[in-house]
Each structure stands twice: as structure tokens, then as C-alpha cells.
Amino acid sequence: MTDSPPWADFFGHPEPYPEQADGIDAAVDAAADGGFLALEGACGTGKTMLALTAGLDRVRDPDSAFERVFVLTSVKQQLRQFETDLRTVNENLPSDYDPVSGLTLVGKADVCPYARENRGGIDRENVYERCEGLRERTRNLVGDGGATTTSNLVSEARSQQVGLMDSGADASDAPDADYLSVDGEPTPYRPDTEEYDDVEFCPFYAGFLDDLPEDGDPAEAVPFDVTELGHVGADELVRLAAGHGSCPHSIMGALVPEVEVVIGNYYHAFDPVTTGTFTGALLDDSTFVVCDEAHMLEPRVRDLVSDAVADASLRDAENELTRVVQPLSFESAGAESDDAALVRGELEDADVTVEEIEAVREFYADLRGELDRRVTAHLDREHPDWRASMRELDDDEIPLRDPEEPGEDAITEWADGEGHGERVWARAEQVGAVVKRVLDTLEDEDKQRAAPGVGRTLNAWYREGHTDFFRAIELERTFDETEPPDSWRRAYNARLALHNCLPSEPIGDRLAEFGGGVLMSATLEPMDLFREVTGLDHLAERGRPVVERTYGLSFPDENRASLAVDAPKFTHQNRGAPGEENPTRLAHLDATAAVARREGNVLVGTPSYAEATWMAESLSERLDKPVLLDESSGDRETESLKDDFFAGDGKVLVTSLRGTLTEGVDYRGDRLSAAVVCGVPIINTARPQTRAVITAYDRRFESGFETALTVPAVRKARQAVGRVIRGPDERGVRVLLDARYARDSWNAVREYLPEHEREEYQPVSPDMLEVALDRFESRRPTSR
């Protein structure tokens, strides 16, 4: 580029789009002043490269205080896009530049050598419990007063393989060799965990501890130079760490503060447990944060800063407290007990009394009884024959206060009335922590303890306010034949849920810890509401600049048809139940079929999976092309469905707008010719939690329904139609099918489209839809 800006060296392509250049400049300038860029950019704008370039400019600038870029995204497809763009940056850096070092954060199940190979009694289901237990035992073996040293543990584990390794044998040459191979990479250890003096330990973790220097700097234990490797993904991390004989997850943690780009998800920045144990080093003003898919920031963080206590967890916590006080009971009866001495020592060190443990245990037992009483009374009232029809029950929710009138919840009132006052709520967290320490010492087993989490949540239950937080009993449908046949526990898992209705404060407080950054998505507008619900306005009031940019599609207008069809409003009242024949359903089916029968792949989004089923069945009766139905399912089934959709000739894929196929999926090239959105996907307002959220927003922003439901629903719709056009040579049709998108009325949503989309999505009557589609087809070039 002529007169290239300083960031040009980190831009991975020959030339930026004008919007990219403007956005990079805005992000760099904002971050230089400790601020943030709120960026809406249409699909194909190049937001990923924009954000990486701005962040790397700040990191590599010698006059800047930034040391790293921390990328957060809620969509796996986008995570992979950041990895791809970072590799592109490194491939195109000037020859005299060092590679940009990067790391993708993943869970233990993805990097544990034993879990990946399903060896050592460790798999993806139990890896967390087994890992914590093995680590604890490994540390006990080598800690103060331990039986041995890390060097001895590693030497003994390696000695099992020394003959094989010295022979130069390869995995392909010795398939039955007695050593662990991970993805074809040989490791220095046997396929199972090791033992020392009948104590099981993890040799990989011992290897990591053995490599730690005396000053304890974890970076010194990394067995490779990350600055020479560029980006390190999960597979390469496992190969490099496990092949050396060290724990890949521990190496990942050691690398977190050392690399220039860390790629993770919202958990890594907003989940209190994750930041407290793993990523806390990133939460400071030397980090340039990138929040991708930022329209999801508010709902995702709301979930992360909410909490719950399951009925089963209460039961387990009560049992754990009982096991801790039992040795003291035996001692009082005259039995000699080393366990009792251990318990008393731990309690003294933690400043927790036996009386406090017994008070908390009694509280948990009484709380389970009250939970049982309330659930039974609710079912008797709402489903009088529930004992005879358990398999027909649905998920349910029992509010503990009026959702629209903030006030003290019924469980807190009950506890106060029963004498379980502030002291027992406040001490529950400390009691849970000491119970875990005692049981981890007394019981030689890998087990996740319930008491710490229960204590932490119940402490928050009593501490948090009653306007921004809503408390309820959640009933999750299950069927457990081990429970008594007349008990609701046979049909339900129950949870005492503490919902954070208004997460703007924790979001803003967390963003304030970073030095600056970018919050971006294809759908942030209306920007004033986005700033409110994410706490950006609060940051601006504290002197942190917040800059806004909105970029529409810059690709040729003639390559797309954008239509807002003035069909009857697809509301629950108008459409009735799925399968019901009425003018509203017929109008939407006719219009959808008109688009779907056109050439190429067509994506159809509906407000729910039930409506998707109806639409798919109805289209199948009208169309010659295949119709695929996306149902609520796991990642594997969804990926298989995508592969079927992309393969061969044109098809129709029908899904829920609240599913995973309308956001973050790359329908590049000719994978998608058209997208139709039926209705406005506003969530069910009957749920008590939803009404509590609306009330909280009404009190804070005076726009509860609009802020909490309408705007997020319009963003969902815009995400779906945004899948069609991804590049300058792509053509396609985008249809918003509902009168609320087409014209103003008392519940219209057209005003929530950004100005450039309101201009582009011109209203079309249903009878003129075919004409508009034909007109677009007539503009198709003779060759592509």
C-alpha cells in the first residue's frame, strides 16, 4: 500500500477493504486511549483480520503497554477463523519480523494424553475428576514431607520405556509396544498411569513439576520455544508436550501469559471459576481484548454469572459434611482416631468450628425437605395426576417471588423463619472449602466434591439483591427408576436457581480490567442499546472512550435481492398450533415455497424447532428438491446435517432461528443461494425468569420488552439472512417474511434494523414476491 499505516505489516492480505482500514484505525486510536471500538460489520467485512491487525499493532508497538491480544468468541467456526487468519498474518509478515505467537485454549478432555486415547481409566467423561485426583496425589508424593521427588517419579516412569526408546523403535514398527502413543506421537510412559508405593500418580504432571525451576516460573517448564512456532493448536500442543513427557494442560496454562495471541471463549474471561484458576493473568490493562459475536455477550455472560444448586448436590454436600464430623463422633465415644486429629487440625487452620459444620449440615437437610415440599405442592396443584403420568411431564419452573415485583424470595423467608439466619448462609462457603480439604485427605479417590460449590452458591443466594437477581426452582425432565415410584425425583432433577437478570455491571467491570479492545458482530445495532446492556456506557462515564462503527455490505448491490415481505404477522396468536390451517400459515408457506423452489441451497429459519418441523413437512409436500430438517441435537448430528446440505444439488434446510445453523456458520461460495426468516423469533414470555428479566430492564433502562426480547430477536433474524452474501462475487436472495419487518405498526421491528438495511429491505406484498424474484433472476450474468 502507498503510504502504508504502521499496522500494514500485520495485515495478512495485500489490500484492506476501505471499511477494514477505517475500522483498524478506529480500534488502534481507541485502544491507545484505553478505550473500545463497538463494531457492526456485515458478513464479509473482514472483521477477524481487522481486530487481529489492530491488536497486533498495539502489541508490537514499542511505545504501547499492550502485551497480548485475547480473543473471545462463542462460536467454534469463528474460533477456527481466528486461527486461520493468524496463520495468514504469519505467512505474510515481513521477513525480518518474528512470528506472532498464538495459543488456542481448550479443555482438559482435548489435551489429556490418557483421555484422548481412553487409557489409564480416564476418558472424556471423568477426565476432570481423575485429573484433579492424580495431580493432588502427585503433589503429595513430592511436597513437604513427601515420600520422594519429582525426578524420582519421572525417572521411574521413564525407565519402563528406556529400552524401547533407546532401540529407536517407532510406533508403526512396534504397534504392540508397551508405551502410550498419542495421535501417533510416542511418549516416554506406559499406556496407563503409574504408581509409587501403591500411590497412583500422573507421570505427565510429574514431568511438568520436574521441569519447573526453583523460582516456580511455569514458562521455564515449557519444553519448546513458542516464539518460533507461530500459532499452537491443541493437536500440536499435545504432540510437543506429551512427546517430551510433560502435561499438555499444564503447559497450556504456562503459555497463557507468554504468547501474543490467546484464542478462547467467553468462559475464559467471564466465568469466575475459570478466571480464578486458569486465565486470571490475562485480566489486566496489558491485554487487548476482542469480543467476537458480541451480540451474544449479554446472554452468554448472564448464564455465566448466574448459578444454581441441584437437589442431588445438596444431598451430596450433606453427606460430605456428615463424613467430616463422623470421626469426631467416634472419638467422643472413646475410639482412638487419627482421622479425628486430622479433622480437628484442618478446622483449626481454617477457623471453622464443628458447631458451624453441624449447623450447615442441618440447614442443607432442612432445605432439601423444603424443596421436596414445594415441588410436591406445585405438581399437586398444576398436575393433579402427575404420579400416574410422570413420563408425560415437561420441564417446569417454580418462581420464588412474583417475577414482576422484586422482593425477598420464599426460600430466604422460610430459612429465616426456621432459624437458619445470616450466619449459616455466610459460613456455608468456608465450610464447603474445608470439607473438601478434609475429604481429599481422608478418602483416596478421585471425586468432585459438592460442598464447595453448594456453599459458594448459597452464600451468593443470601448476599445478592432481589431486583437484578431472580430466584426460582427449576425442574429438568429426566427419569430415574432408582427413586421411589411416588416421588417427583423419579421424574425431575430440581435446582435452586439464582439468575442474574441484568449482567451489564459484571460485563462492564470485566471489560474495565482490560486495556482496551474491540467488541464486534454482524448484528450489534441498535448501538445505544448494545452499549447499555454490555456496560460500555458505564465505562464511557468513567473516562474510557467508546467509539462506534457500522459497516453494511460493500459488495455489488445487483448481486442480491433483499426483501421484506408484508405477510401476516407470524405470531403465536395468528398462526395457532403447528399443523393448524389458517391464512397466516398458508401465506408464510406460500412465500417460503416460492423462494425455496428456486435454484441452489435455501436456508429457512423459523421461531422454534416445532415450527421448523411443520415447515419442513409442509415444504416436502410442495417441492421437488430435498428438504432437510434440523432438530435440537448434538454437534456431531449438526455437522453431519451440514455436510448433507452442502453435498450435491440444491436442497432446503429448515431450522430454528434459536439453533446453531443460523449463526457463525460459513456458507461461502455457492453453498447458500437464499435465506428466508419466518416471523420474529421472540422467546416465550410466559416463563417467570423471562418476565423477571423484562422487569429488571424496565427498572434500569425503561425499555424491558424491547431491550430484553425484541432487539435480540431481530439480531437472530439478521444473523440468519446474513449467511447468504459473504464475498464480492456471491449472489443471493435474503427474505424477511413478516409484516413487522415490512411496515410500521404497534409491534413492528423495522425500526431496529440499521438505517442501511431499512433502505435496502424494501417492503414487498406477498403477491409481488414471485415478480421480485424473477426480476432478480433476470439480472443473473450469463457466466460466473
Image: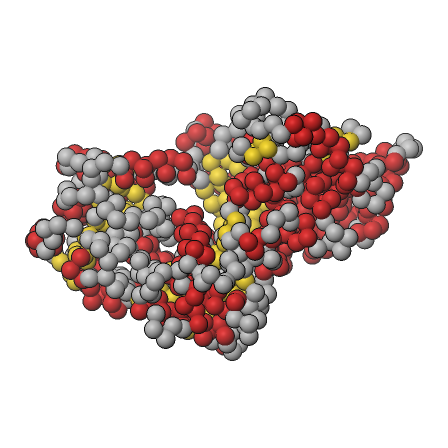
Q: Residue 389: x percent and y percent?
A: 43, 29
Quarter in which the N terminus is drawn: bottom left
734 with respect to 73 (left or right) = left
Q: Total label count? A: 0
Above or below, 320 against 2 in this view is above
**Frontmost residue, 400 versus 575:** 575
Outermost top residue? 176
Res 113 seen here: yes
Viewer-proximal residue among 766 and 293: 293
Q: Is residue 185 left or right of residue 54?
A: right
Quarter where residue 68 is shown: bottom right
640 relative position to 688: left or right:
left
Residue 767 visible to the viewer = no
Query: Where is residue 20 drawn, in percent x and y?
Result: 35, 66
Position of residue 203 measured from the top left corner of the image (x, y, whole percent): 69, 36
Quarter-of-image position of residue 142: top right
Residue drawn 55% across the image and 68% down it: 66
Residue in the image at 65% along x and 39% along y: 245
Q: Residue at x 32, y 54 (%)?
A: 719
Residue 475, horizontal then vertical, whole percent: 49, 41
Establish if 419 lies above or below 505. above
> Residue drawn 20% across and 39% down?
650
